[in-house]
Amino acid sequence: MRARPIVTIDGPAGAGKSTVARALARRLGFLYLDTGAIYRAVALAVSRSAELRGQVDLGAGPETLPAPDQAALGALAAGLDVRFSDSGTRVWLVGEDVSAAIRTQEIGERASWISAIPAVRAGVLDLQRRLAGEGGVGAEGRDLGTVVFPDAEAKFFLTADVASRARRRTLELQGRGEDADPVQIRAEIEGRDRRDSERTAAPLRCPEDAVRVDSSGLSVEAVVDRLASVVSSRQRS
Ligand code: DC
């Protein structure tokens, strides 16, 4: 039995998971754990490695990568020094603040690609569990309720229609000064959904015991209220 609960929020890209998970964690006095940032940090480390960079071919499926190369990416993921700030919003990779560098569209694509490799997922699994420690955590990702924290006290699956998600992602990237073409963003989101849902290793899927919330047309506040009330009812029971 954990000292404090773990709350998981899974769902597709652009459903508002980060904003909601961050706000929920703040409201509950929990640690915020952004597991996508870990996959992004791994993708950044791979793209900076002269030896490993060439293994990521976005034009081909990751399953076409020979087993020894998959193992090399897994070894890098397992040994990587990734740390978060107390608020969970800043990320360090081997001592370097990579909070901005991991947020580009390209690193998101690469993270989606490498995250389909079972050895990479296995490498990241321990780190996620270690970071969650004794609980009191609001964690967001793709497979948290199904694989990483199957015994979490409260699980949510946050979705939104693809048009709302593409709109949100476009505004987010433009807000950071990146070029963002809404048509291209939508196509990339659809591609990422397909890859994240169809991979054999821990595909994106709603956990059976999760509360499903569609955030299209809802304010962040309304979504956080809904989640917080479920968490507090679980804590009472
Ligand atoms: O949530 P995000 O866009 O920052 O995540 C980037 C990629 O990382 C996402 O496309 C799939 C992968 N990911 C994953 O496979 N499992 C997680 N728990 C979190 C992210």
Image (cartoon, grey):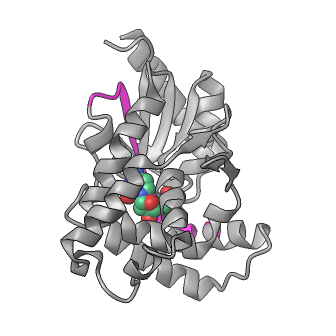
Question: Is the residue 226 above or below the residue 99 in the image?
Answer: above
Ligand 1 resides in the quarter of the picture at bottom left
Give x and y (percent) for residue 220.
64, 46
Look at the image and say whether residue 157 sits in the magenta stretch. Answer: yes
Quick check: 100 left or right of 42? right
Residue farthest toward the front in the current orientation of the protein: 51
Q: Going 35% across and 63% down the picture, which residue do you hit?
A: 73
Depth check, front residue: 52 or 130: 52
Q: Residue at coordinates 31% horizontally, 40% vertically from top-left? A: 148
Near-viewer residue (215 or 21): 21
Q: Where is residue 102 in the image (x, y as percent from the top left)?
A: 61, 62
Split into 4 quadrants, where in the image is the C terminus? top left
Chain part drawn in magenta? 151-168
Quadrant, the N terminus: top left
- Relative to the observer, which residue lies in front, 184 or 121? 121
Looking at the image, residue 106 lies above or below residue 84: below
Q: Can residue 82 be seen in this view?
A: yes
Q: In this view, does 125 lie above or below 152?
A: below
Horizontal side of 94 relative to 5 (left or right) equals: right
Give percent across and percent down for residue 131: 47, 32
* Quadrant in which residue 62 is drawn: bottom left
Q: Position of residue 170 (x, y in %)?
A: 66, 74
Residue 162: in sight, yes or no?
Answer: no
Q: Residue at x 33, y 49 (%)?
A: 123
